[in-house]
Amino acid sequence: MKTVDLNCDMGESFGPWQMGRDAEIMPFITSANIACGFHAGDPATIAETIELAMRYGVSVGAHPGFPDMQGFGRRTMSFTAGEVFDIVQYQVAAVKGMCEARGGRLRHVKPHGALYNQAAKDMDLANAVARAVASIDRSLVLYGLSGSSLLTAANEAGIAYSSEVFADRTYQPDGSLTSRTCGNALINDAELAAQQVIGMVRDGRVAAYGGNVISIAADTICIHGDAANAVEFARVIRNALENNGISIRHPIYANDK
């Protein structure tokens, strides 16, 4: 039986400003990527989201991004590899400490937005991210775009990685995600997203822009928690996976042992 992880970006509210429907989505997923306060989130939101994930038996992950609240971490930024190492280490350490203070464990790290996309292509940045994760806890799993430099860097750093695919994004022929600046970047129909997910998980293939079909590895599927239809997406995709005989669970982490 094929097995896949279903993850969601969460904890992105800030003060009185609410982002996402975390409590409604949590029952459908197996891993939560919690914003660390740089691109979104605040200490109270981080704590609440950790506790919510623990209540549902969902694995807790850190979701570090660039220090860019105004741009929600999605704007390209210029940082040295050393600076990226520091900002990732800082954010992951904070969420790990808050998780452990509540009797939980941090299981994985998934970079956010522009940091994720830049590190997927830039080996220096990818190495900085992987080394920062390894410096905190070598049992943490690094989530990265399938086939990207992030996964190569994780392997070179001696830490586990999980190949991530996206339910609601379209792909380019080189395996990268279509830029959000393009009109065809997002898939807004839950049924179409579910069809794409099944193809990636079951067949290891996805239709890219221009009609090319490319190979892709899918260990974990991302659902964006800030999307207006995120709850519907989570429900439809989970049902589609189960109806196709695909088991949904978080990865077997080294720190489970």
Image (spheres, rainbow, N blue to C red):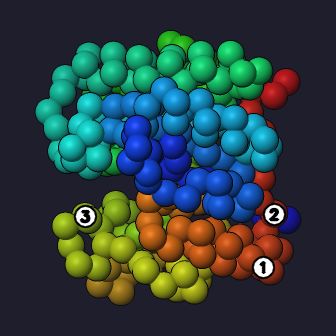
Q: Pointers 1 and 3 in contact (CB under 8 A)?
A: no
Kind of residue at disc 2? Ser
Q: Residues within 10 Å of mark 3 (few under 14, many from 20)?
A: some
Residue at the disc numbered 2: 247
**Looking at the figure, which quarter contains the N terminus?**
bottom right
Disc 2, SS = strand
Determine the residue positioned at 64% across, 60% down: 25
Determine which residue is flagged by label 3: 179
**Badge 1 is on which residue?**
244
Query: Left of 84 or right of it: where is 112?
Result: right
| Earlier-in-chain disc, 1 versus 3 | 3
Within 10 angstroms of label 1, few (less than 14), some, or many (20 or more) residues?
A: few
When the figure is inspected, residue 15 is found, relative to residue 85, above or below; the finding is below
C-alpha span from label 1 to label 3: 30 Å
Q: Amino acid at mark 1?
A: Asn
| Quarter in which the C terminus is drawn | top right
